[in-house]
Image (cartoon, rainbow, N blue to C red):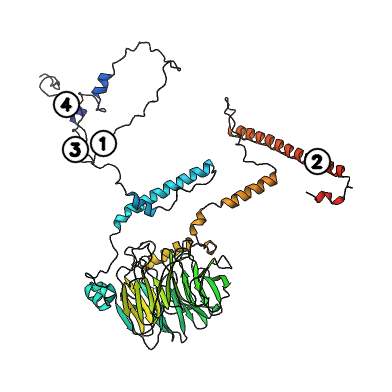
Amino acid sequence: MGEMETAPKPGRDVPPKKDKLQTKRKKPRRYWEEETVPTTDGASPGPPCNKKNRELRPQRPKNAHILKKSRISKQPQVPKKPQEWKNPESQRSLSGAQDPFPGPAPVPVEVVQKFCRIDKSRKLPRSKAKTRSRLEVAEAEEEETSIKAARSELLLAEEPGFLEGEDGEDTAKICQADIVEAVDIASAAKHFDLNLRQFGPYRLNYSRTGRHLAFGGRRGHVAALDWVTKKLMCEINVMEAVRDIRFLHSEALLAVAQNRWLHIYDNQGIELHCIRRCDRVTRLEFLPFHFLLATASETGFLTYLDVSVGKIVAALNVRAGRLDVMSQNPYNAVIHLGHSNGTVSLWSPAMKEPLAKILCHRGGVRAVAVDSTGTYMATSGLDHQLKIFDLRGTYQPLSTRTLPHGAGHLAFSQRGLLVAGMGDVVNIWAGQGKASPPSLEQPYLTHRLSGPVHGLQFCPFEDVLGVGHSGGVTSMLVPGAGEPNFDGLESNPYRSRKQRQEWEVKALLEKVPAELICLDPRALAEVDVISLEQGKKERIERLGYDPEAKAPFQPKPKQKGRSSTASLVKRKRKVMDEEHRDKVRQSLQQQQQQQQQKEAKAKSTGARPSALDRFVR
C-alpha cells in the first residue's frame, strides 16, 4: 500500500494563515483627525503618547524611597496662578482653520443702554445678603437680555420713511397727489377716499395690528373692513346715532357707543351684548393690556368695563359735567379727561379721586392726545391755543402755538408726529425724532378735506393717517408716521386665525390687574422703604426689643456626627430662647423700675392713689 497522505505543514509549502488583527482593514483617517503612530504587530492601538512629556519626566526606580513633604513649609506661600488649559481643537473648525475673531461680536455700549431697564445707581439701604444676591442675578439677566436685544436690532431691516423737499421748498405745500405719484404702487393703493356723505360725520378706529379699519356714522352706519385688501368684513345700520366706535383686544369684537346704550358686535355684524349700565356714552377708549373698556358719558361718569369677564370694575363720578374729551396714555394706561373749566384730570380705576389735575387753558378743553412714550401731552382749547405739556412730573407747557380756528381733534403717531384737525384742514407737525416733542413752528404736511373733521387716528405700523369727516373717510399718506418694524408675537398684521386665538389665550393669562394702574408704573417694581421702616418700628414696639440688632447665632461644626441638621437646629433654638429670655427679663425690669419711679413721685407729691392711675402713661 502506498503511504497515507498527510496534511501539509504550515512551515513548508503552504503559506501560513494571517492573523485576524492583520486581516482587518486599516481605518481611514479623516482630514480633521491627527495622524497616529503605527503600532507593532499584535499590539492594540492606544492613545497617542507625548514624547516631550516623557522626556521631561525621568522614570523613578520602583524601590526608591519618597520623602513626605511637611504640611508647614518654611518658605512663604505664594499663591499659584490657575493653569489655563488650552484646547487647540476647540479653537479650530472642522477644516482646521483657526477663527480670527473668537468669541461673540462686541456690542456698542450706547445700543445696550437703549434697551437697559434697570437703574444700577439706585441700591437698597442695608439690604440682606440673600436679597442682594437675588438683585445681582436679576441685574445679570437684565443685562444679558439687553445685549440680546441690541444684537437682534440688526435684524430690523425696515427704516422709517421721510419726506424732503428740494432746496428751500416747504414740505407743507406738497399735496397728496404729488406723494401718490412719487411712491410705489403698493403704497399708492393705501391712499383712498370713501364718499359717504349721506351717513356722516364719521368716527373711525384702527385695530392694534393696523390691518383692519372700523368706522361709524352719526346716522347709524357701521362698517369694518380689511383696508389693505379692501375686503369688507361687515356693514350694518343700527338705526341709531353712533357717537364713537372702538375695536376691542382683537378685530373680532367691536364696541359701538350708540345714542342710548353701549353695544358689542362681532366681525360679522351680529350683536353680542347690550350693556345698559353704560348709557349716554360719548367717548370710548380700550386698554389692551388690562382688557378694560373705558367709557365717558353725558352724565359725568367714567366707567371701566372688564371685557374678559363682563363686569364693571369701577364707575367714577368725575363731578365735572358732560364728558366728551377723553384720551389714554399708552405708557401707563391712565385716562386723561378734558373739562369745560380748562383743566385736564388724570384718572385710574383704583382711585376715586383724580391722580392729578392740570390747568391747561383759559377756556374749555376741546381735544387731548398723549404720545406713545407717555412723555408729552398735546391739548387744544377754546382760546385757540395748542400746547404741548411734559408729563414727567413737571406738567409744564413746553411749547405753545395760537391757531386761527382752534383744533377740535388731536392725535399722535408712533414716531411722534402730531396732527390737528381745524375745520376741514388737517395740519401735521414733526419733531427731531421719536423721543423729542414736535416742533409747532412750521407744519410738516397740510391737507384740505371735503368736510369738517370729526375723527383722527394714525394707522399703526403704516405711514397712513385715517380721517373721518362729514363727507366720509379719507386715508392720507404721511411719510415717517408709523413704526417700520413690528413685533410678530405681539401685533402681527399677517397672523392667521389660529395665531390670533393663541395670542388671545396668552394675553388673557398675562392680563394686568386694574388696581396696578398708576402714574409711574416703574414704582411697582421698587421696595416701599417707608412702609418697611414703619413695620420694623411697630415690630420693635410689640416685642420690646429689636430682633435684627444682633447677628444670628451660627453654631460651629463638631466631630463624630454631632453636626447633624437636627442638632444644629436644636443648638440654634436653645441660644435663641436664652437670648429671648434675657431680653424679656430686661424689659420686665425696666417696666418695674418705671413703675417704682411713678410710685415714688406719687408719694412725694402726697396725692391719693386713684383707680384711674392704671390708664396713665
The residue at the point 33 percent across, 73 percent down is 443
Cα distance between the residues tagged 1 and 2: 85 Å
What's the mark number on residue 89? 1
Mark 2 lies on a secondary structure that is: helix
Residue 337, given in percent of the width and then of the height, sits at: 50, 72
| Image position of 67 with respect to 230: above or below | above
Give the residue at mark 2. 597
Cα distance between the residues tagged 4 and 2: 117 Å
Which class describes the residues within 10 Å of circle 4: few (<14), some (14-19), or many (20+)?
few
Cα distance between the residues tagged 4 and 3: 34 Å
Q: Residue furthest bottom?
A: 198
What's the mark number on residue 17? 4
Cα distance between the residues tagged 2 and 3: 97 Å
Mark 4 lies on a secondary structure that is: loop
The residue at the point 54 percent across, 73 percent down is 302
Question: In terms of sequence position, does the residue under pointer 1 or pointer 4 come before the other?
Answer: 4
Residue 19, given in percent of the width and then of the height, sits at: 19, 26
Question: In terms of sequence position, does the residue under pointer 1 or pointer 3 come before the other?
Answer: 3
Looking at the rendered image, the disc whose residue lies closer to the viewer, 2 or 3, is: 2
> Do the residues bearing badges 2 and 3 touch, measured as CB atoms within 8 Å?
no
